[in-house]
DNA sequence: CCCATACCGTACTGCGTCGGTCCAGTTAGC
DNA sequence: GCTAACTGGACCGACGCAGTACGGTATGGG
């Protein structure tokens, strides 16, 4: 159904949390805006091993920086505005390839040869890729908050943008 | 991986074949441009039951017209230029809903409430939907044929646009 | 009137991928 | 040296998809 995996959704949640925590620690005067995966897990509600898995994928894609050892953790590699949705999807779910026979996935289609849409999906694929590339996480974060159907606590709704995950720690 | 199902791919193949066959029968003087699912199956190489399944989905979405009874078959409901890729995807794979918590799929996300990206995916979802809506099957068919990597028979390459599926019948 | 043809709907099953978990290993602070 | 935390890989159950099968219905021809 053209559905993206839940891991990608979690990745966005984690990244947003990471950005928000960044700001919080910076405001507190700490020079080390680093968050651990257990901390992010308890802040977002996502099970901890899953958070670790997602962060691992994001780290290998250079979307976050990892600091090993004790007092280690993760840090955003770039500001949210510099990260597009396509980057996140590519980091977690692999390259964007709608079908098996686009440029990305080298010839896995079993109809290759007598299929009428030989490489035509590339057009659609590129269109989607551009659309996803044009949207940054900053855009998603500062969207017009169209949650008209799901009212949360008034205090949370009243807060500016990073209103969520106020139950952290 | 943001991958669309193989059935959708087949649907495009079948629709293109249907349009091409339409033209062929019209040229032959027949007033009934109708093709049976077995005929399309043998023309495209897709297994027959799968073709029937796809055609059923397309028929219930009013993308093709079905004529029952003996000498029945399927016919295009609209010209290819009037059918967008989004229509085909929606017909075969259900509505386009990237995640479980967009407007389409009513609240299936288990993080609902403390998730930071409450309804923000709608932005991405709409972008993709518009991108897919803007591409018609005609566009896919008349794409610049970027099959630089996969050379077919020269005769087929030399033919104008609907060069494919020449091995029909 | 009867039969062949072809669509229609549903139900079933095997398989591949995804979501989630676990464990051993490595690095760096204390 | 010990502990906290990341790293990489493997493992397994669950779910959805791809494909198949069967009975039913409608139409046209003999
Ligand atoms: S779907 Fe891959 S060649 Fe047609
Ligand atoms: S993913 Fe559905 S509410 Fe966050």
Image (tube, coloured by chain):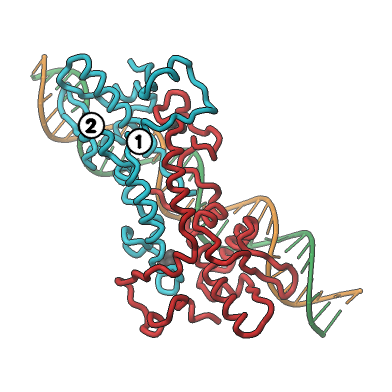
Chain colours: A cyan, B red, C orange, D green
**Residue ID at (49%, 35%):** B101
Q: Describe residue A120's horizontal placement relative to residue A136 as left or right.
A: right
Q: Residues within 10 Å of mark 2 (few under 14, many from 20)?
A: many
Q: Describe residue A71's horizontal placement relative to residue A100 as left or right.
A: left
Q: Determine whether A55 is above or below A117 in the image.
A: above
Disc 2: which chain?
A: A
Disc 1: which chain?
A: A
- Residue A139 is labelled as 1
**Residue A110 visible:** no
**Residue ID at (49%, 20%):** A152
Sooner in the amino-acid sequence: mark 1 or mark 2: 2
Q: Secondary structure at mark 1?
A: helix
The spot of residue B90 in percent (x, y) is 54, 52
Position of the C terminus of chain A, as image quadrant, is: top left
Question: Quarter of the image holding residue C26?
Answer: top left
Mark 1–mark 2 Cα distance, whole angstroms, equals 17 Å
Residue under label 2, please give it.
Answer: A76
Q: Secondary structure at mark 2?
A: strand
The spot of residue A98 in percent (x, y) is 40, 55
**Residue ID at (49%, 37%):** B102
Foreground residue among A5 and B24 = B24
Question: Quarter of the image holding residue B118?
Answer: top left
């Amino acid at each position: 159904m053209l559905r993206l995996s839940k891991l990608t959704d979690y990745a966005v949640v984690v990244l947003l949390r990471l950005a928000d925590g960044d700001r919080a620690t910076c405001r507190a005067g700490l020079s080390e805006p680093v968050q651990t995966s257990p901390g992010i897990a308890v802040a977002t509600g996502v099970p901890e091993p899953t958070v670790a898995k997602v962060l691992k994928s994001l780290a290998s894609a250079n979307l976050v920086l990892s600091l090993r050892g004790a007092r280690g953790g993760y840090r955003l590699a770039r500001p949210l505005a510099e990260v597009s949705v396509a980057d996140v999807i590519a980091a977690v779910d692999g390259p964007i390839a709608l079908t098996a026979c686009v440029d990305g996935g080298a010839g896995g289609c079993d109809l290759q040869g007598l299929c009428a849409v030989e490489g035509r999906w590339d057009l659609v694929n590129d269109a989607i890729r551009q659309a996803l590339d044009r949207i940054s996480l900053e855009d998603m974060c500062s969207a017009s908050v169209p949650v008209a159907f799901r009212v949360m606590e008034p205090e949370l709704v009243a807060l500016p943008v990073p209103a969520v995950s106020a139950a952290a720690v």
